[in-house]
Amino acid sequence: MKIKKNVAISDSGFIFNPDTGESFSANPIGMEMLEMLRDGMDYEEIRKNILDKYKSEKDTVEKDYNDFITMLKQYNLIENDGQKDD
Amino acid sequence: MEKLRYERPLIRKLESDMPNKFGSRTEFLPKTHIDGIAVKDLINDYGSPLFVISEKNIRETYQSAKKAFTTRYPKIQFAWSYKTNYLSAVCNVFHQEGSWAEVVSGFEYDKALANGVSGKKIIFNGPDKTEDDLRKAITNDSLIHIDHLDELYTIIELADEMKQKPRVAIRVNMDTGVYPIWDRFGFNYENGQAWDALNKIMRSGKLELVGLHTHIGTFMLTAQAYGTAAYKLADLAIGIRNRYNHKIKYIDMGGGFASSNTLKGAYLPGTDTNPTFDDYAEAITSALINSDFEPGNLPLLILETGRALIDDAGYLLGSVISNKRLSDGRRNTIVDVGVNLLFTSFWYDHKITPAREFTHYVEDTVLYGPLCMNIDVIRENVSLPLMNKGDQFVIHSVGAYNLTQWMQFITLRPKVVMIGSDGKPYLIRESESIESITAYEKMPEHLKSFKL
Ligand SMILES: Cc1ncc(COP(=O)(O)O)c(C=O)c1O
């Protein structure tokens, strides 16, 4: 699961996809997840980082992570290289 | 280090500046308290979902409506429209404020009597008054508003038989410039039906014609329609004076003022666009004052305002059951409030706000109720903060019609609490129990047992 290489992620919460010219915005946790994905972390690492920092539960994070990935796919922000999903 | 509050990750596409179908409104400002009581405590004590009514809001709204009229016209009387909300505690707030009762059925009539309204101060409207209803209303000297000729003839017969002179008015319908015309109730002004009925009443000599009534529609977005209607009723009143030397005592303009709700499909929120009490009052009272009534002899002006007096006082509290995605990627949220409790969600885009603080991040969401039916949509699209299972929310301005038109469907109807002017919560309607439903059922002997 990798963010497309040419997608630009700014510190202020904006995402730009030069392939399509589309811009996106994310909330702070969304930004953190995007950055972790860009840094190549897998789901286990991401979940651990989130749970270390935020008051939440494993199931909730898992459900929200999967939902977030669905949206990234829908928005064409994920590398389509046949990699395994996690 | 203390952990931070979690919020689900969100990414959304930035659209151009065109307002989209989700509208420009975002509803992330929380409503944490109602009249000083925390929403979460209310749900904790009385359950979710829960209807909450603010006594303070009713009284303030009533006073502001009253002021809009009394500052412009000498004789004003409100009559509480029972069908809008006939929980007795609600009716009695209006009666304490001075409202008479306006009813449209034998059931509502009995309810008003049971609440302690004297028969003389009950206005009996509607097309379906049974002979027994009419007898009762005549005995109690109530104000009977005649809807059709069959009713007029029945009342004349009853007056004969009972040797009493019933106090009556006729309901008039008319072209006010707003379409469709509500012409199925009462007698038409333009085509002469109204005059025909008035002549029959006056010539019978058996009824006392005390007033003229109209109800031109509901949620009327132009105040001027009321000016036109008031002018036409004044014209009839003056015609009766000229023809029969008879003065009617009141003109009843019915209900229909818009509340602060936003009609479905409206571009701007109702709070920005709907006429105010002052707008309606100005249109009605100037039409009456500028008509040919002698200045010292204006008729009493009766108003049967319903939704505009009670909508804002009502809240429906609920909780999130689950978040999902539709196949097209849209977020949907399932809540524990269905359209069976919120009939008005078919008319309005109700304002919905969370019951606690969230960040300003919002997501466009379809809000579904828990009924296993496709029509169960509370909001087709609303921008809501990132609420999760268990989070509580407040639906605003639900005081009108929901508590009379709600349906018992697959679950039991919830409690209703009134927050008193003293700031204390009072349970004014219990939640239903399985017994309250099955008590009305009867089981034929041969169906009482079975083997599986
Ligand atoms: C005769 C009559 N009066 C008053 C009302 C109250 O109307 P609203 O709630 O629109 O003010 C109604 C509602 O239908 C009505 O039929």
Image: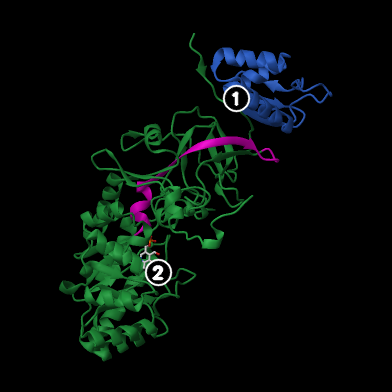
Chain colours: A blue, B green
- Element under disc 2: loop
> In the rendered image of this protein, does residue B140 appear above or below residue B283?
below
Q: Is residue B320 magenta?
A: yes
Give the quarter the ligand 1 occupies. Answer: bottom left
Q: Nearer the viewer, residue A55 or A58?
A: A58
Q: Residue at x 30, y 67 (%)?
A: B109
| Mark 2 residue type | Ile
Residue A60 is tagged as: 1
Nearer the observer, B149 or B265: B149
Q: Residue furthest left?
A: B296
- Looking at the picture, does residue B192 appear above or below residue B19? below
Residue B363 disc label: none
Question: B325 above or below A80?
Answer: below
> Which residue is disc 2 drawn over?
B216
Packing grade of label 1 (10 A; few <14, some 14-19, many >=20) is few
- The structure residue drawn at horizontal position 31% and vertical position 38%, both measured from the top left corner, is B35
* Amino acid bearing label 1: Thr
Which residue is found at the position 84% from the left and 24% from the top?
A: A82
Q: Residue furthest bottom?
A: B203
Figure quadrant of residue B204:
bottom left
What chain does badge 1 belong to? A
Q: Is residue B187 left or right of residue B140?
A: right
Residue B66 among magenta residues: no
